[in-house]
Amino acid sequence: MPTRTARTAWNGTLEQGSGQVELTTSKVGTYDVSFPKRAADDAGGTTSPEELIAAAHTSCYAMQFSAEIAQRGGTPEALDVQADVSLGPDSANGGFRLTGIKLTVRGEVDGLDEAGFKEAAEAAKANCPISKALTGVDITLDAALES
């Protein structure tokens, strides 16, 4: 399997500094980051490590979920996956930590009932490589089959 690369160029202190995250392997873009905007409710046109983790998690989960559905005899027609990644204080070690990830998935699937859909959704949560990498974070799942 290939290795994928990203890089960040950072200038300045945590409070006044800023950086640019480059998706090096795909060359699809360079995105601004800053700690004040990371910690603010309005990101103001910048991304954050949490948003990048959310993007990685949703795409990985969707791929794994489609495989889990197929393994159970279903055919995924459409999956809509959202990840809400929360950052908060780390009272045990100081600084900050990811305090939770809420995965929400809605799907149109042929060949599975609601129980089969939810079983596949839970299996995808357990088997997605990004979920596995984030085992230190509480990940919740809200999955529903749509007709």
Image (cartoon, rainbow, N blue to C red):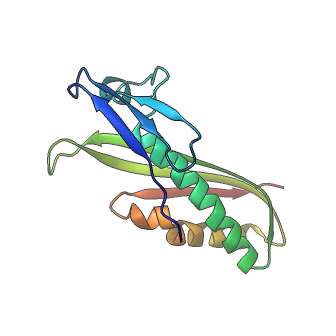
Residue 43, image quadrant: top left
Q: Is residue 143 left or right of residue 78?
A: left
Residue 11 pos. (x, y %): 27, 27
Q: Residue 33 placed where, x, y %?
A: 39, 30
Report the side of 91 relative to 35 (left or right): left
Among the 4 quarters of the image, the one containing residue 95 = top left
94 or 138, which is in the foreground?
A: 94
Q: Is residue 4 above or below residue 99?
A: below
Which residue is more in the foreground, 113 or 69? 69
Q: Is residue 44 left or right of residue 13?
A: right
Along the viewing direction, whichever of 53 and 98 lies nearer the viewer:
53
Residue at the spot x=34%, y=48% of the render?
A: 99
State which quarter of the image contains the C terminus. bottom right
> Does any portion of residue 115 appear in the rendered image?
no
As drawn, 134 above or below 11: below
Q: How far across and down, in percent of the image, does residue 77 sit?
A: 82, 59
- Counting every numbered tag in the picture gives 0
Query: Which residue is painted at 43% across and 68% down in the image?
Result: 132
Residue drawn at x 27%, y 24% is: 17
Left/right placement of residue 74 relative to residue 88 reads right
Residue sitting at x 23%, y 25%: 12
Q: Is residue 82 visible?
A: yes
